[in-house]
Image (cartoon, grey):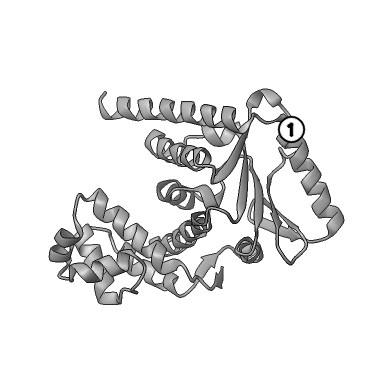
Amino acid sequence: MAIEDNPRSREMYGEELKRRREEAGLTQEELSQRAVMSRTHIAHIEAGRRRPDVRDAERLDQALEAGGFFVRFLPALDGRKVAEHFAEALEFEGKATVIREYAPKLVPGILQTAAYAREVLDSGASPKSREERDELLATRLERAQILKDFHSPVVWALLDEAVLRRPVGGPAVMCEQLQHIVKLGRSHRIRVHVLPYTVGYHALLEGFVSLMWFEDLPPIAYVEGLKSGRVWELPSVVRECQVAYDHALGDALSHRKSLDLIRSVAEDYEHEAQRADHP
């Protein structure tokens, strides 16, 4: 694993705390009473203005029955842990002004919800301890913070239909994940295109690719396979990847039709989840 600086991690820690607090149906005041912490301190942590110490994290874990998550999350405030083959691409991702990604099987990392990402990290071939899983999860959720700036980077997501149909984590997780993508697409924060099964073979079918452009650097391409990834800076190779992306994009559904399809599939998952809850 490689570790990188993580300047937005406090904010992401706070967002996870807020999410879990609200899932538990607690106000900040109610959590403060359970955790024996001041409401103001909790508000500062949730807003990313203060870093919790170990005692804070232990109290939050106990109050929210989080199983030690917030203690294990603390090291992520000092750095990002990622797979070695992705470390260089992560550095480029943070500087990019334009990102265009193609995903053949899984939702791209910057678009993943916490539940979806947790399932992906838990289901890998190599077993991970809870500590390792949570450190990787912290990094993945932090990467999504680049979408908070509405204007940069400009993000296009080209998704194979398999991404929508593979029920990672089950119907409830998939419904939330697809609704998240629809929300980003309808707010015009990202542009989404789906490559339907009916296209058959297309130019990018072989694997994941991320194309990035920068203000003061030449464009690069990052391609990834099983336990491997490579950043390409050679202009001829980058251009080949760009051309392949353009060809595949030409076979995809329009942004509007893609969002309609994603929304429809999300509704199917929602109905399936409801049937499971009320057999």
The answer to whether 87 is drawn above or below residue 193 in the figure is below
- Say which residue appears at 68% left-offset and 57% top-offset: 229
> Which image quadrant is residue 153 in?
bottom right
Residue at horizontal 19%, vertical 56%?
A: 27
As drawn, the residue found furthest toward the left would be: 33
In this picture, residue 6 sits left or right of residue 49: right
Mark 1, residue position: 250
Q: Residue furthest right?
A: 236
The spot of residue 210 in percent (x, y) is 67, 51
Tag 1's secondary structure?
helix
Q: Position of residue 202 (x, y in %)?
A: 74, 33
Q: For the point 71% across and 26% down, which residue is it? A: 200
In this picture, residue 48 sits left or right of residue 256: left
Q: Hey, which residue is sitting farthest front in the picture? A: 151
Badge 1 crowding class, 10 Å Cα cut-off, few under 14, some 14 to 19, many 20 or more, is few
* Residue 173 location (% of width, % of height): 40, 40
Q: Is residue 254 left or right of residue 204?
A: left
Q: Is residue 177 above or below residue 220?
A: above
**Screen quadrant of the N terminus:** bottom right
**Image label count:** 1
Question: Which quadrant of the view contains residue 243?
Answer: top right
Would you say residue 95 is visible in this rendering? yes
Q: Residue at x 31, y 73 (%)?
A: 52
